[in-house]
Image (tube, helix red, strand yellow):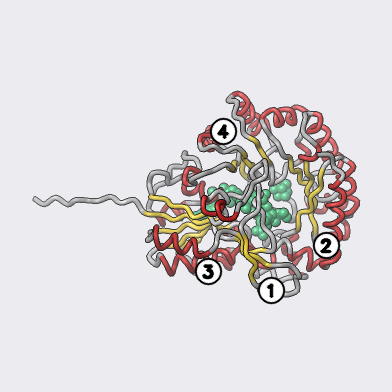
């Protein structure tokens, strides 16, 4: 009789959050939450390594570059000027590569490799040049690694992503093809793999999926379908893991955090208060002012919300009705009253307004900016990114080639639509209006 010794080896998986190629980028609580969620489902079943080009806490980055954070954990990335791609010849702004220098990744691959798989995060569609760089380096220095891409760019531009030459694309939120490819059964009860970071002070969280609205510039309703709360037990597990790791600031990545708040946000915040969690919460992805009641505002402030970003976009009723009626001006005014009544500072409340929307002729942007100023809160112009597959994005084919994802760039489109001078004039006006908001 012979005995076969079966050695069970865990696959070695490299996780990469690539560098950003863009005119501007700022660490506004940016984390590769999708990638970490996927890796969390495989916790203990693979040998994971992370290379996050955008990790401003990585010891070698902060030592050399002094990448300071503000009091809420935001800050600038290390960056280098690079030549503008031909598609942006007409855009008179510096083009840059944000994130750790390329040679650091090459050294890392040479010392930590080889890997069996490389899972790469994709985020904005117009950031695919960072993926090209990453894929090239992995192919060269860990040639046996199977490369897998997932996330927003793959979901919105699957055909373009297919041209980058990786081994597997995982568009959308169905991860079954990934588990089959890796031949590892997932444990969906596990929290994201935050523990793969050597040091972590900012984390992200989602209590809900999807959105009940249908704004004409947004991909969320089509991609994520019906709104639904996530299981509360799982959300609390995510919170606890981040707290154990020393996270002080948590940004919500929900699309409709306040919708049906009694089923998701309210029970979550009651737990936060009960556990005396001492975490600062932020809402960079915008809250819907319609759902801010006096009671909810009070609970949010008590539970630790420090900054409030509200999606307003325009004070023009015509524009609001045409794009999905997600919020009206009086609802914004009411929400601000409730937040300030609950103790939030006006300077920590910001209303986003889209700059460079293709229906700017009915948006009355300047009037909207002044309306926001009168409420005693800050305004922020959110440059419009035309999103493929949305009504407004497809309308932009009038001006740009939507099949080239670089053209979805949020700095480029407003300049193409309005011109450099007009776009700058509106940004200067916004700065001027914000100057007088009391801190
Ligand atoms: C959070 C968020 C942000 C954050 C930053 C996120 C980040 N890390 O960079 C903030 C608030 C800063 C932001 C800013 C902007 N955003 Co944004 N944002 C989002 C949002 C709400 C969630 C993305 C997310 O991380 N979700 C959490 C994860 C867990 O979910 P997921 O991505 O669905 O992941 C699942 C699968 O995709 C898969 N998966 C994900 N990653 C990976 C990786 C691998 C390897 C695998 C196998 C699988 C996989 O598994 C996950 C679990 O099921 C999306 C909308 C949405 N719901 O997707 C818009 C979205 C990505 N943003 C968008 C836009 C327009 C913007 C802005 C341009 C808005 C503006 N004008 O200012 C800016 C751009 C910022 C910049 N610097 O250029 C657009 C996309 C635009 C584009 N052309 O790509 C989106 C799609 C919303 C929309 N309007 O349609 N955003
Ligand atoms: S409310 Fe926000 S997430 Fe929902 S469809 Fe409109 S823009 Fe998208």
Residue 232 is tagged as 4
Marked residue nearer the N-terminal end (2 or 1): 1
- Give the quarter of the figure containing the C terminus: top right
- Specify few, some or many for label 1: CA neighbours under 10 Å numbering under 14, 14-19, or 20 or more: few
**Spot occupied by residue 6 in the image (x, y as percentages of width and height):** 22, 51
Q: Mark 3 highlights which residue?
A: 164
Foreground: 438 or 420? 438
Furthest toward the left, the residue is: 1
The Cα atoms of the two marked residues, 1 and 3, are separated by: 18 Å
- Specify few, some or many for label 2: CA neighbours under 10 Å numbering under 14, 14-19, or 20 or more: some
Q: Seen in the image, is 200 located left or right of residue 138?
A: right
Marked residue nearer the N-terminal end (1 or 3): 1
Q: Mark 1 highlights which residue?
A: 87
* Of the two numbered discs 3 and 2 in the rendering, the one whose residue sits closer to the viewer: 2
SS for dot 3: loop
Q: Mark 2 highlights which residue?
A: 423
Identify which residue is drawn at 78% across, 68% down. 416
Identify which residue is drawn at 73% across, 40% down. 308
The Cα atoms of the two marked residues, 4 and 1, are separated by: 45 Å
Foreground: 378 or 369? 378
The Cα atoms of the two marked residues, 3 and 4, are separated by: 38 Å
* Ligand 1 neighbours mark 3 (CB distance < 8 Å): no
């Amino acid at each position: 009789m012979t005995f076969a010794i079966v050695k069970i080896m865990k696959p070695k998986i490299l996780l990469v959050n690539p560098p950003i190629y863009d005119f501007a980028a700022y660490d506004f609580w940016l984390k590769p939450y999708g990638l970490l969620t996927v890796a969390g489902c495989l916790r203990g079943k693979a040998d994971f390594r992370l290379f996050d080009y955008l990790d401003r806490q990585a010891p070698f980055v902060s030592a050399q570059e002094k990448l300071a954070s503000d009091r809420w954990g935001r800050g600038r990335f290390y960056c280098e000027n690079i030549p503008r791609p031909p598609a942006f010849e007409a855009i008179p702004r510096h083009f840059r590569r944000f994130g750790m220098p390329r040679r650091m990744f090459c050294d890392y691959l040479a010392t930590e490799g080889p890997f069996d798989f490389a899972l790469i995060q994709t985020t904005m569609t117009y950031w695919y040049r960072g993926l090209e760089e990453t894929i090239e380096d992995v192919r060269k220095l860990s040639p046996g690694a199977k490369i897998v891409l997932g996330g927003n760019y793959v979901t919105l531009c699957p055909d373009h992503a297919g041209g980058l030459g990786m081994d597997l694309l995982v568009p959308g939120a169905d991860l079954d093809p990934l588990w089959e490819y890796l031949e590892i059964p997932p444990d969906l009860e596990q929290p994201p793999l935050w523990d793969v970071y050597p040091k972590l002070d900012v984390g992200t969280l989602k209590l809900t999926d999807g959105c009940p609205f249908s704004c004409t510039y947004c991909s969320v309703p089509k991609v994520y379908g019906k709104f639904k709360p996530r299981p509360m037990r799982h959300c609390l597990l995510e919170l606890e893991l981040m707290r154990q790791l020393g996270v002080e600031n948590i940004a919500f990545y929900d699309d409709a955090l306040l919708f049906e708040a009694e089923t998701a946000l309210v029970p979550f915040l009651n737990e936060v208060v009960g556990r005396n969690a001492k975490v600062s919460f932020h809402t960079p992805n915008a809250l819907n002012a319609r759902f801010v009641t006096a009671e909810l505002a009070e609970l949010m402030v008590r539970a630790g919300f420090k900054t409030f970003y509200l999606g307003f976009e325009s004070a023009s009723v015509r524009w609001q009705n045409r794009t999905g009626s997600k919020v009206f001006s009086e609802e914004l005014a009411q929400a601000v009253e409730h937040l300030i009544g609950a103790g939030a500072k006006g300077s920590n409340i910001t209303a986003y307004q889209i700059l460079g929307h293709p229906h700017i002729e009915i948006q009355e942007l300047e009037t909207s900016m002044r309306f926001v100023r009168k409420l005693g809160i800050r305004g922020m112009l959110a440059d419009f990114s035309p999103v493929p597959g949305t009504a407004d994005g497809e309308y932009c084919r009038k001006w740009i080639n939507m099949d080239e994802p670089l053209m979805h760039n949020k700095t480029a489109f407003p300049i193409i639509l309005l011109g450099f001078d007009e776009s700058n004039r509106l940004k200067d006006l916004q700065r001027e209006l914000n100057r007088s908001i009391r801190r």
